[in-house]
Amino acid sequence: MLGILFQCSNSVKIKEFILKHFLIITEVIAVVLAFAWPLPGSKLSNSTVSLCIVAVIFFFTGLKLKTDELKSVYRAVDVVIICCVTSLVITTLIPGYIVHQLPFDKKDGSSNGTFTFGPDELKLGIILFNCAPATIATGIIMVTGAEGDVAVAVAVSTITNLAGCFLTPLLFSLFVDAEAMKADSTKLVMKLGLSLILPLFVGKVVSVVFARVREVVKVHKRKIGLVQSMGIVIILWIKLSTSIKKGTFELIALTDILILIGIIIACHLLLLLLNFLVSVSFCFKRIHLSVMLLLCSQKTLVLTAAIASALPDKIGDPALILLPCFIAHPLQMLIDSFLIQPLKKSPHFPLCVPGFCAKCRSSEGDETDKTENNQTNGETTANNAVYIAENPSASV
């Protein structure tokens, strides 16, 4: 009997482990399958299949999107605005510009004979990932674990993902070949509109109109998340199989992968630093610091996979562009997981450096005035005491 209970408990633990790390486990399986037998995936390489999968993913995203939370954050609307601007602009342009300056192989062959970090598509993949908005689920879960402001986290995630459908392609276009983007810009807009924006809108409308659908989504939220993860992995498998069939991955060495991992880690640490500095400059409370570090520093994989699958072939190989995105996503979760407990145990008063933000400077000025007044009053009292001691009649 004990043996049966032990086996049951083990099976429950194994099931929970698989569900918790479902995306990473299926990613590994997809990579192994693609390298072992690339033919099936390469047969599905036409863009229609990938776009249909993306449409299903974003339809479910629309069903799960919680716009009701936006009503409850009026008390911290300034924090929401700062978080959204940081997530969509600051953590996009700064790391994007830095990565864009790094030496990668150019398509025109101009980098021949010089040291490079690998194919140019790897650089584009890093930039695309950093152009994405905040995560939809992972960051919110981490903010909850750190006892941060969950309502603000949900609002920021919702706003950035809605805006990201329009902004991410525009921001990404700043760092790629303008002619290649311009040549197929109309086709790209149509692809993104049909596979991202329209399904997202339809999913949200269905969720708002039909109360029964909302109840089903709430009950089966985890299963829907697994379906979305499976869709992302299938896109990876198709693109990877196609590239392997073409022999594209023969251009990548092990050193390129190691350098790529190093750049991705450095980029995420830079995002954490930027968001920390923004939090300090605006004197954020601990609950809002958690949102900045654990949500705004993370980038969603769903949108990057969707955009990469819709990019024109002139930009580069889709599988090589996707590779940094699929490496960066679990790495950011791993790094940020170490911040949950320190943020949870950190003080609840506003985190700021005296003299760095306007609030501190004004408070510091008030304290200085009080100190000077106290010193002046003290000196006056001491002088009066000396005067009275020397002139006893003055005390009458």
Image (cartoon, grey):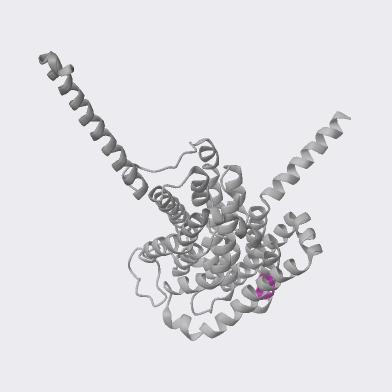
| Residue at position x 63%, y 60% in the image | 31
Image height of 218 relative to 237, above or below? above
- The quadrant the C terminus occupies is top left
Left or right of residue 227: residue 319: left
Main SS, magenta region, reads helix
| Residue at position x 78%, y 67% in the image | 210
Q: Residue furthest left?
A: 390
Residue 163, quarter of picture: bottom right
| Image location of residue 207, percent across then percent down | 73, 66
Residue 46: in sight, yes or no? no
Left or right of residue 156: residue 262: left
In this view of the protein, which residue sits in the foreground, 54 or 125? 54
In this view of the protein, which residue sits in the foreground, 238 or 124? 124
In this view of the protein, which residue sits in the foreground, 133 or 252? 133
Residue 17, quarter of picture: top right
Residue 238: in sight, yes or no? yes
| Image location of residue 4, percent across then percent down | 86, 34
Is residue 183 shown in magenta? no
| Image location of residue 317, percent across then percent down | 53, 73
Image height of 225 relative to 277, above or below? below
Q: Residue furthest front?
A: 396
| Image location of residue 316, percent across then percent down | 50, 74
Q: Residue furthest right?
A: 1
Left or right of residue 88: residue 33: right
- The quadrant the N terminus occupies is top right
In this view of the protein, which residue sits in the foreground, 259 or 291? 291
Query: Which stretch is magenta?
Result: 50-55
| Residue at position x 46%, y 58% in the image | 82
